[in-house]
Amino acid sequence: MKKIILISLLSGVISPQSLASDIDINPIVVSGNLREQKLSDVMTSVSVITRKDIDRLKPQDIGSLLQGQAGVEIVSTGGLGMQTSIFIRGSNSSQALVLIDGLKVMDEFSNATPLQNIPVSQVDHIEITRGNASALYGPRAVGGVIQIFTKSNLGKQSGVDGSVSYGSRNTQNYNASYRDSFNNTSFNVSVNHQETNGFPTLNPKQNDPYSIANSTKSSYDSNSISAQLSTTISPGHEIGYKILANEFNVLSDTGNKSEFITFTSANSNYMSSLNSKNIFNQIYTKNEITSFWNSKISFGTSNITNRVNYNFGQNGIPIANYTTQQKDFSWTNDFFISKNQTIVLGLQSNQISTKNNDPYFSLNLSQCCGNPANFSASRVINSVFMGHTAKYDRIGTQINIRHDNINTGEAANTGLFGLSYDLTNHIKWAGNISNAFNPPSTAQLSSINAGGNTALKSEEDKSIETSIQYLDQDTLARIVLFKKETTNLIQATGDRNAVGTRTLQNTAEASNTGIEITAQTKIHNLNLKGSATFQDPINKLDNSQLARRAKEFGSLEVSYPYEKYNIGAQLLFSSSTRDLLVADGCPTGNTFCTKNSGYSITNLFASYRYDKDWHLSLKVENLFDRNYQKVYGYNTPGFGAFLTIQYSPENK
């Protein structure tokens, strides 16, 4: 199987040149070195999902868009709006740093990354950095960084865009945007509504003694708005403002036969409802201080509020509220020493606070624990960083170092050191070594509900990678070999505390060695794009495969534009993964009770532009209606077809 995948991905490298294509082989990125550079010049392992990719693939959410990217596994417990985990190079989901316009997206209580909180309709493009990136972005960037950039359209011709979509499971999507400019000021506003009836969350054939499944569908609806404003005060001096706001509701099967009798009634259907409100704000200024010194100052805030009704439709059931707030200040300076030499210097201060009230944890516990229903805490991370990038004839170098100091007692020095060599005009070798850290959240340190332990240390990771890259005007392909070792992993392995939660401990170690292959080429009008990852994510304590991580996975996409038409197909595949049961009911000594079988699914897409402003597109997901799962006991979407009518003037 590996040989077949390798041949299919690399065949484009030796293919003849193309005649035409809409795909950008070598776009500009910023994630690999905190400054703009061509994708082919990046020494770390970086991928880009462009706006054209999003328009072509028509994903329902961010997770679907990321699935199939090299080194990235997306695992969700159901349909739209459900909890989504991100495993980059086998690292835990809490070790993936997600940024939206530079602001962190995280839940300080659960230490999870709520990827499902970001509406894909408001996304312009995404950059994915694989491997340690703490020297660039600070804490949490152990597995990698997913940087999401919202729609801009600033500076483009004034006008309106819009789309209407309808499809399976009564899925509806409405989007509209308007942009304009006057004098030296530009602005853009985009709104979106999305809803679906969904599908049942739990598989009734995989119930355990602690869970229950029913046929009620997990419905979802969301409303979002984004806006950007930018004005040029004088040549080389710009000030701007960005905002993204989103609210969604999801009804899901809790699967929980609660031991607290006051939580259920005889006619309870065990359905839970979640209302989530998210807002991200940022004001910034960009200044060309001199011909060799550019400076950017930004201040941003975010607020994520989740309101949980544990048994929807049942009177008298307590409501839980979880809030994470963030304030972030950064000052970044680029110094252009010469045409081929740049220095980056910067400061950052990030304050994250959480406030939670969950009556679930106070039931029958009045005799202990104070008031476990309430928890609030905050932490401040102050950082200083620098980087140096240079090109000396055929040799390239990259050095990044960073110091982060956290007021809860943790501090870390991280670094990334890269080297590249142009073997020919088309072939380049590159390599880097790096380290990263992930400190415990405030809840992990002191919340009894989260299994808090004040003695927890930061998780630490060391990584090394090497790569070979091929580039010409029609092809960009890269093979990356990596090895990483993670220590002090935080896991819930201690005794159960008074509220029934296992105490967190630094008891685990993990390693991963693998190969990532990415390739994109154009053969006449035919576009080929693919990725494959072969890895060995291991829990070093018992030498077992890490839960829900596959050893082989990837994607292959083929598209063909012809006159007003564009047709294509996408194949996603994954080998089997080890998993836990739905509830914490595994026998002692049997850490992994079951497995999720390997799978492959096929998606189709087609579009027709019937004049310069309007086009029609069709997306078919899971064409052969494969029955597969990524989390034991949880369903995944079956066959789905979605039709979109879009107004998008090509002269914009």
Image (cartoon, helix red, strand yellow):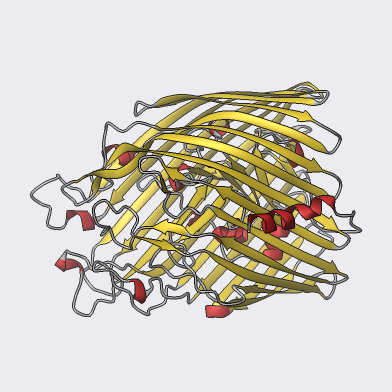
Residue 642 higher or lower than 116, as above or below: below
Q: Locate the N terminus and report the quarter of the image it occupies.
A: bottom right
Residue 572 versus residue 130: which sits nearer the camera?
572
In the rendered image, residue 289, in percent from the top left (x then y), is placed at 73, 24
Marker count (numbered) = 0
Which image quarter is the C terminus in? bottom right
Q: Nearer the viewer, residue 612 or 191?
A: 612
Side (left or right) of 423 relative to 187: right
Give the image quarter of residue 559: bottom right
Res 376 seen here:
yes
Relative to 45, does residue 163 appear above or below in the rendering? below
Residue 585: x and y in percent read 25, 59
Residue 326 versus residue 418 in the image, above or below: below
Outermost residue toward the left?
367
Relative to 171, residue 435 above or below: above
**Left or right: residue 184 compared with residue 511:** right
| Residue 345 visible | no
The residue sitting at the right extreme is 19
Residue found at x 24% / y 69%: 209
In-image side of 239 versus 168 (left or right): right
Q: Nearer the viewer, residue 472 or 512?
A: 512
Q: Nearer the viewer, residue 355 or 509?
A: 509
In this view, which residue lies farthest toward the top?
Answer: 337
Task: Return the x and y of residue 234 as percentages of the image width and height.
Answer: 76, 33
In percent of the image, x 52 and y 65: which residue is there?
223
Q: Position of residue 446 (x, y in %)?
A: 26, 38
Q: Residue at point 55% right, 60% down?
A: 574
